[in-house]
Image: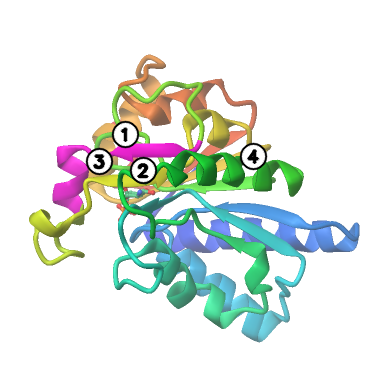
């Protein structure tokens, strides 16, 4: 889905999510959303907040699972994805706090607890009935979540090492690349691909090469987003800039 600009994409994706939330509520079911952070979904989240405020869209029966979290940060840390989600969405809607899940990044990077927590995260997703819609942004190198080059299509939630380009892109948030964590916890490619439906959003010419490789290139573990080609219900929502290489 190619739209003239990012604002149109954000509105279209928020409208799609609203529809899924309302459909699930009408059937007396939970809607399970996989959520992403970064600059890309911010405006879409603003629309969801507006829909809650002005259109009585309720999130009481929504369960969320975020893709990833930096490792070695406290949940309240300025750059933590938990904090991002509170500030941009959760604090402004009626979602139950216990229904929001973000991987726990507060463990030490070498803690033996990490793999236990990652397995528990997978179990929580399964117990919720799986993810109905997984929202994705796109890293400049074609990663989804923090599934960097070499991530297997069978990977699950785990500790990952961040690539050089990813750390450079995050440098501004951390006031210098040297402060960007070296590790994160990320849902794996297989975790993402298990979602019943996937929406990948990307904006701007800086993402055009990654979008083109993901959509038209070979399916390869060098570009985790290319795995989406094999998903039965994955859609790309982009502006003209991000579509420039197609
Ligand atoms: C990080 C996140 C991804 C996100 C990507 C792009 O790598 N882990 O989930 O999609 O950044 O971020 P942005 O939307 O700011 O371009």
- Mark 3 C-beta to ligand 1 under 8 Å: no
Please tell me which residue lies in front, 115 or 50: 115
Q: Which residue is mark 3?
A: 162
Instruction: Tell me, yes or no, if residue 244 can be seen here.
Output: no
How far apart are labels 1 and 3 at the CA level?
13 Å
Where does residue 29 sit, x and y in percent of width and height?
A: 85, 57
Assign the C terminus to one quadrant of the image.
Answer: top left
Sequence-wise first label, 3 or 2: 2
Check disc 3: other Cα within 10 Å, few if <14, some if 14-19, many if 20+: some
Q: Secondary structure at mark 2?
A: loop
Mark in the foreground, 4 or 3: 3
Measured in 3D between alpha carbons, the distance from the residue under mark 2 to the one under mark 1, in whole angstroms, is: 6 Å
Residues in magenta? 157-169
> Can residue 139 be found in the magenta stretch?
no
Query: Quick one: SS at disc 4?
Result: strand
SS for tag 3?
loop
| Mark 2, residue position | 138
Q: Which residue is mark 4?
A: 197
Q: Judge the density around disc 1: few (<14), some (14-19), many (≥20) Cα neighbours within 10 Å.
A: many
Taking the image as shown, residue 22 lies to the left or right of residue 76, namely right
Q: Is residue 137 above or below residue 213?
A: below
Task: Determine whether, in the image, residue 99 is placed left or right of residue 228.
Answer: right
Return the residue nearer the eye: 47 or 84: 84
Q: Is residue 151 visible?
A: yes
Does residue 208 appear left or right of residue 34 in this picture? left
Which secondary structure, mark 1?
loop
């Amino acid at each position: 889905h190619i739209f003239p600009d990012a604002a149109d994409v954000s509105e279209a994706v928020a409208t799609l999510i609203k529809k899924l939330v309302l459909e699930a509520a009408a059937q007396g079911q939970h809607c399970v959303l996989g959520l992403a952070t970064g600059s890309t979904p911010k405006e879409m989240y603003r629309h969801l907040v507006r829909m809650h405020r002005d259109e009585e869209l309720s999130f009481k029966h929504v369960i969320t699972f975020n893709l990833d979290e930096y490792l070695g940060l406290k949940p309240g840390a300025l750059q933590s994805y938990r904090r991002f989600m509170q500030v941009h969405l959760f604090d402004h809607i009626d979602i139950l706090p216990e229904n929001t899940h973000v991987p726990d990044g507060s463990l030490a990077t070498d803690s033996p607890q990490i793999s236990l927590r990652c397995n528990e995260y997978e179990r929580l997703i399964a117990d919720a009935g799986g993810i109905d819609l997984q929202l994705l942004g796109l890293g400049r190198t074609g990663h989804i979540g923090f599934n960097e080059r070499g991530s297997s299509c069978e990977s699950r939630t785990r500790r990952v090492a961040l690539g050089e380009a990813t750390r450079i892109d995050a440098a501004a948030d951390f006031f210098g690349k040297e402060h960007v964590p070296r590790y994160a916890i990320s849902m794996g490619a297989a975790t993402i691909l298990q979602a019943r439906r996937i929406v990948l959003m990307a904006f701007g010419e800086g993402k055009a090469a990654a979008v083109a490789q993901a959509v038209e290139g070979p399916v390869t573990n060098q570009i985790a987003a290319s795995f989406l080609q094999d998903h039965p219900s994955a859609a790309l929502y982009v502006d003209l800039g991000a579509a420039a290489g197609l």
